Image (cartoon, coloured by chain):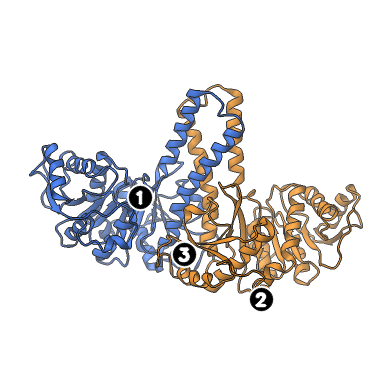
Chain colours: A orange, B blue
Amino acid sequence: MRDVPTASPPVVVDAMGGDHGPAEIVRGAVQARREHGVPVVLAGRAGVVRAELARLGAVGEIDVAHADDVVPMTERGAGAIRMARSSLAVGLGLVRDGAGAAFVSAGSTGAVAACAVDRLGTAPDILRPALAVALPTTAGGATVLIDAGATVDPTPEMLAQFALLGASYARLVLGVADPRVGLLSIGAEPGKGNRLTRRAEALLRDLPLRFHGPVEGGDVLTGVADVIVTDGFTGNVVLKNVEGTVRATLALLATEVGSSGVGDGAGTRDAAGAEALRRVAGRYDPETHGGAALLGLTGTVVVAHGSSRARTIARACVVAHDLARGEVVARLGDRPAVRPAR
Amino acid sequence: MRDVPTASPPVVVDAMGGDHGPAEIVRGAVQARREHGVPVVLAGRAGVVRAELARLGAVGEIDVAHADDVVPMTERGAGAIRMARSSLAVGLGLVRDGAGAAFVSAGSTGAVAACAVDRLGTAPDILRPALAVALPTTAGGATVLIDAGATVDPTPEMLAQFALLGASYARLVLGVADPRVGLLSIGAEPGKGNRLTRRAEALLRDLPLRFHGPVEGGDVLTGVADVIVTDGFTGNVVLKNVEGTVRATLALLATEVGSSGVGDGAGTRDAAGAEALRRVAGRYDPETHGGAALLGLTGTVVVAHGSSRARTIARACVVAHDLARGEVVARLGDRPAVRPAR
């Protein structure tokens, strides 16, 4: 067992969310502590969680915060807020009260985000939270789409903060030293865009970040920018449009391949083709695009995908721990840690 | 030759736009007149256009409006407006002066739309124009996305008009008797969406059309609605995101198939697979998604794709002629031609 730093508050893990919880979630939390040195607390039904800890010989090693209820995976928002004794409510309560630095859940993204915004206020200097999602690109890396749905009617100033939050996310989580930030718009010519993006563009040019300029809807998956900033309405539409268009393309392709006779009787090769289709589909599935981070609240919230196994949960704890060290927020203060690249 | 009705003003065709103009464009215009009975006028360099007409034995059958200049296909907007003697300017001038009922061009969508908005005012009762694009769906039909980029900051009242324009387009062009109209948003639950969509949703419920309710970014290609209404900013981002995501999916798939060995040495089958990939890509290519109609101006404008051959140009003339008969606008008056379906 590695030495676990005790100075920083622990990451609170929702033991009950996800398709494979609590067994895989508890295993992931134990991995996060033992292998990565991340302090963790588990929120959920104490009896169930302790039984899982016992199976791993980890009773006494990780604290448990008891919660009576479990928010169902089908719950997308407001309903979750009303469940005051759920593992979401108890876990986020710990973060709100300073007993936790960040929250990790494999529950429904909508439910987790709604509860998090409801129970945690915004961080100092931050006007509104933003949801960051890392989408794989054809260039081989990932692009952070922010905001993917937390703040639907932001001001230009909020978009500028989303840009800084997204750049910090790209540095801390994707390891990009000096991320290029694009503003989602409808053309690069002067005067293109809507009222919001035209005003935001002027602000972005003055920020301590590497502003790439406007990007378009066709640039989301090309890797032309490491971070793409947009309002939460457009971002959510784009995220779901990416997922839907990948599904539609693969469906149309299956039809075309079928009608041209490519699928006739070649077992091994067809199985490999079908497996390739599944892998591409899986990369952009709403439950498997790597999770989403709700940034800008008092305490970071990371939503791992519902089908997460232990290793993914452990990774989410590391991401949450890194994000919670105050670095994302610090760069929004008066003394930016990164100088303008221009 | 069929009897050509002379009562309605002709459709003005930009003879110079497109990758295969003027030969294919002139051939399409002649087809529109001879095979579909659509009255047409050709705008472009008179000598070139008359030579093409002579080749088809159609001199004297179709009028030519001379224009000195040609807007290049690379021009996306404002630059085209300043070319006062282009075939775009001359053709749109005829429509503006009442000598033409509609305008068809295979030029750059951005350039055509910018010139059209600049030179034609809005139709009676219409607040702002909207660009309608028909996207093929996995259900086998098409969904009209409106507005795909003409009006980036609409009011809720404008969105309501776009819904009526889009429904008329679906009836006239797609032949859907009672189109289902969806409002692009980020969830169907009450209170979801942004300020614009929440106010527009209330208006849409009172309109004489079959309102399906809110739809999401993942519904654009499923055929869940015949018309999807959105503001021109979101619509343009979505249109380009569909095109980009189709390209990215096929690129990722090619990589996956290659790495799993599916592509190794089976000529016929691989050629068929590559052909299937090309067909799917072609359906969502910006230049081949069936063209876009700029609705709500005095005179309809149809932008055919740049690679259009004669048959597609003829079809665009028929669409423009149908749309220009006043039916799209008529339904926005005090006595709607279609009663609520609910």
User: Where, quadrant-wise, is the N terminus of chain B in this rendering?
Assistant: top left
Q: Give the secondary structure at mark 3.
A: helix
Q: What residue type is labelled 3?
A: Thr
Please indicate, yes or no, whether residue B334 appears anywhere in the rendered image. no
- Residues flagged by tags 2 and 3 on a common chain: no
What secondary structure is marked by label 2? loop
In contact (CB < 8 Å): disc 2 and disc 1: no
Going 18% across and 58% down the picture, which residue do you hit?
B90
Mark 2 against mark 3, which lies toward the viewer? 2
Image position of B86 with respect to B319: above or below? below
Question: Mark number for residue B197?
Answer: 3
Q: Which residue lies furthest to the top in this view?
A: A265
Is residue A110 left or right of B286 when viewed as pictured? right
User: Is B92 or B229 nearer to us in this picture?
Assistant: B92
- Left or right: A296 as drawn, with respect to A212: right
Residue at screen point 52% across, 63% down:
B193
Mark 2 and mark 3 in contact? Answer it, CB < 8 Å: no
Q: Mark 3 packing: few (<14 Cα in 10 Å), some, or many (20+)?
A: many
A2 vs A155, nearest the viewer: A2
Instruction: Judge from the rendering whether residue B136 lies leftward or rightward of residue A327; answer left or right.
Output: left
Mark number displayed over residue B178:
1
Do the dots labelled 2 and 1 sit on one chain? no
Say few, some or many: other residues with alpha carbon within 10 Å of mark 1 (under 14 / 14 to 19 / 20 or more): some
Q: Distance between the residues labelled 2 and 1?
A: 60 Å
Q: In which quarter of the image is residue B157?
A: bottom left
The percent coordinates of residue B7 (x first, y second) are 11, 52
